[in-house]
Image (cartoon, rainbow, N blue to C red):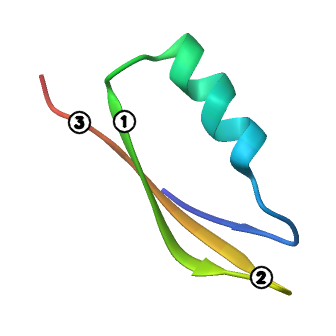
Amino acid sequence: MLLLNDHDPNPLFYQLSVTYPGIFEWTYEETGPEVWKVRICRLVA
């Protein structure tokens, strides 16, 4: 999934880390100041 946001979605990272520990990868592709792009990938077990 590619997330596009107008601010740093870092709080979402922490929420996902608690809810789904170890099953996703979070990679910043762009870090503002106007657009943040984060690629979120599910890791295969």
| In the displayed structure image, the side of residue 36 where residue 19 appears, left or right | left
First in residue order: circle 2 vs circle 1: 1
Which residue does the image show at 12% across and 22% down from the upper left?
45
Q: Judging from the image, what secondary structure is the residue with disc 2 in?
A: loop
* Kind of residue at disc 2: Val
| Extreme residue in the left direction | 45
Q: Which residue is mark 3?
A: 43
First in residue order: circle 2 vs circle 3: 2
Q: Judging from the image, what secondary structure is the residue with disc 3 in?
A: loop
Name the foreground residue: 23 vs 31: 31
Residue 21 location, x and y as percent?
41, 17
* Kind of residue at disc 3: Leu
| In the displayed structure image, the side of residue 27 where residue 8 appears, left or right | right
Q: Judging from the image, what secondary structure is the residue with disc 1 in?
A: strand
Residue 31 location, x and y as percent?
66, 78
Which residue does the image show at 58% across and 26% down from the upper left?
16
Q: Which residue is mark 2?
A: 35
Which residue does the image show at 85% across and 87% down from the upper left?
34
* Kind of residue at disc 1: Phe
